[in-house]
């Protein structure tokens, strides 16, 4: 009985890891526009899961809060974000050509409640960073815009996923996550699953 419970817990952990991987792979596919298109069918899959930054915009108070990656991509500090940064100040750090489009994207997301996805250049410390922001606006029980929550990633041309071995890609990424989180038992099971992909078919 104890073994069954441990198996259930392990299955749940692996399912969670794979869920994280699927979301990141889906995001990687979306960011793949600049990557090479004609890869040989048997080339090994190269998958780089981008580091993800998180933010919340308190709409009524007009204050952005975010983590260290969000701060680094926008030339601000975690301390400033803890206190709150106005949306105008955030947009001012973006490329001038991108500012009107980003502002319109935010406006439409607040107005409609639909998911917003914008890409823009920022220049923290004078270094150009290509940022992709995705989020949506949540509403309170009165239907008023409350919090705009989402993620940011830095778009890099090195993100490649040719899709020739999706099972192995999922397992590779899940194995990395399991090791990072110190879940050695899950890592061992995923590694066993990886070995099956190397076996010749009957």
Image (cartoon, grey):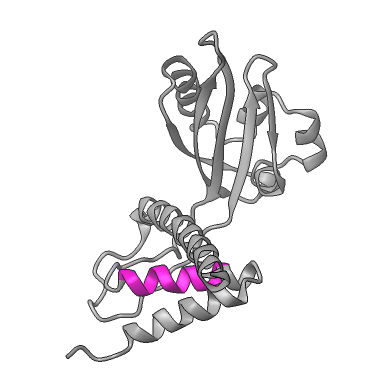
**Any magenta on residue 171?**
yes
In the image, 63: left or right of 14?
right
Residue 122 vs residue 26, the one in the foreground: 26
Residue 171 vs residue 66, the one in the foreground: 171
Q: Which residues are magenta?
A: 166-177
Residue 140 vs residue 30, the one in the foreground: 140
In the image, residue 43 lies at what x, y percent?
Answer: 30, 80
Residue 39's quadrant in the figure?
bottom left
Q: Is residue 46 above or below residue 101?
A: below
Residue at point 73%, 28% (across, down): 85
* View extreme (left): residue: 202
Residue at point 26%, 72% (across, down): 164
Residue at point 29%, 67% (across, down): 163
Residue at point 40%, 52% (across, down): 31
Magenta region, main secondary structure = helix
Q: Is residue 16 above or below residue 60?
A: below
Number of numbered markers: 0
* View extreme (front): residue: 1
**Any magenta on residue 167?**
yes
* View extreme (top): residue: 142
In the image, residue 105 lies at what x, y percent?
Answer: 45, 25
Q: Is residue 186 above or below residue 76?
A: below
In the image, residue 23 lies at what x, y percent?
Answer: 43, 52
In the image, 48: left or right of 199?
right
In the image, residue 196 lies at what x, y percent?
Answer: 34, 84
């Amino acid at each position: 009985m104890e073994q069954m419970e441990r198996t259930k817990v392990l299955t749940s952990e692996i399912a969670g890891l794979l869920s994280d991987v699927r979301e990141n792979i889906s995001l990687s596919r979306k960011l793949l526009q600049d990557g090479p298109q004609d890869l040989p069918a048997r080339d090994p899959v190269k998958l780089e899961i981008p580091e993800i930054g998180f933010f919340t915009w308190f709409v009524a108070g007009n204050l952005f809060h975010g983590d260290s990656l969000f701060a680094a991509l926008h030339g601000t500090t975690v301390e400033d974000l803890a206190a709150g940064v106005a949306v105008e100040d955030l947009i001012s750090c973006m490329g001038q050509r991108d500012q009107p489009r980003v502002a319109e994207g935010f406006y439409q997301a607040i107005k409609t409640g639909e998911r917003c996805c914008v890409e823009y250049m920022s220049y923290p410390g004078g270094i150009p960073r290509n940022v992709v922001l995705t989020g949506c606006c949540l509403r309170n029980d009165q239907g008023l815009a409350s919090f705009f929550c989402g993620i940011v990633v830095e778009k890099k041309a090195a993100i490649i996923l040719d899709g020739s071995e999706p099972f192995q890609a999922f397992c590779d990424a899940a194995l990395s996550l399991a090791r990072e989180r110190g879940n050695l038992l899950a890592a061992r099971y995923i590694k066993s699953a990886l070995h099956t992909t190397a076996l010749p078919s009957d």
